[in-house]
Amino acid sequence: MKRVAALLLAATASVCAVAQQSAPHILYGESGRGYRKGELPQSLGSGWLALVPRDGVWRLEPARFVSTPFSGPHDPQGLDDSTSLGVTPDDALALFDLPELAPGKVDTPDMRFKSRPRAFDATTVLPLPCNGRDWSLRVRDDRLLLSDGVTSTDVGEVSDDAPEHRTDLLWAGDLDHDGRLDLVLLRSGIDGSMLCVWLSRRAAQGQLVGKAACLDQAGC
């Protein structure tokens, strides 16, 4: 999982501010470091769940946070008043504070999510069979679509004309235990990044998933 943490940190290396000022409901695993004091609450409270791999399966497990003052060298931009977050368990891919989620085993497509995020372009078709249904992600007219073979739902932008803007699939599976597919997506570009979880329990009528929470991070 250290490679996953390194990828997530690299994906946000240019980020210097968190645009979302209210208490977040999704966080990167192992990457709460570098936030300015006040941009995250001093106490993140109970109810947080960590998405972690355990013996070949994915699980949601209770997470605990420890906040400590940032002890790095002085930063002329003022980042030396940051708060560093430690997380237990320390091998989480992502962390959630959402009422639809509960601890336990999480069903996923038969694919590895620990090695690297999956980027999309105009030719991408990614099968995601799960719980007996043939889900897939594909690109059409610069939009990333989740499909179950009957219905399609727009979950983000993918543009070959602007390769600096990309949408990566970090994870897919049944997070909310309703038998339907959910997604964790990272949208990144020159002006920052946005980590979002899409849940089937948040879907509007005629949709497969709805956006449940995002962590919006803006660049300098």
Image (spheres, grey):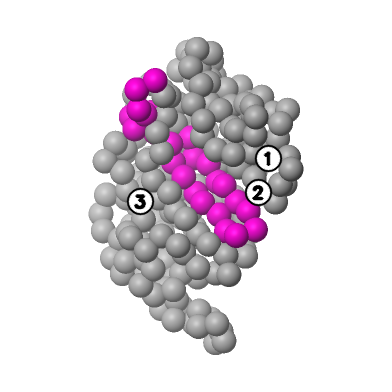
Question: Sequence-wise, which precedes: disc 1 or disc 3?
Answer: 3
Spot occupied by residue 194 in the image (x, y as percentages of width and height): 51, 51
Range covered by the magenta-colored residues: 183-206
CB within 8 Å, label 3 to label 2:
no
Q: Is disc 2 placed on a helix, strand or loop?
A: loop
Marks 3 and 2, how far apart in space? 24 Å
Neighbour class for label 3 at 10 Å: few (<14), some, many (≥20)? some
**Element carrying mark 1:** loop
Identify the residue position indicated by label 3 in the image: 25
**Residue 92 in sight from this viewpoint:** no
Q: Callout 1: 10 Å neighbours few (<14), some, many (20+)?
A: some
**Residue sitting at x 39%, y 45%:** 213
Residue sitting nearer the eye, 156 or 60: 156
Residue pointed to by mark 1:
159
Circle number at residue 97: none
Which residue position is annotated with label 2? 165
* Residue 96 percent coordinates (x, y): 37, 47
Side (left or right) of 26 relative to 76:
left
Q: Does the CB distance between marks 2 and 1 fall below 8 Å?
A: yes
Please say if 203 is above or below 190.
above
State the CA–CA distance, disc 1 to disc 3.
Answer: 28 Å
Q: Is residue 83 magenta?
A: no
Amino acid, disc 3: His
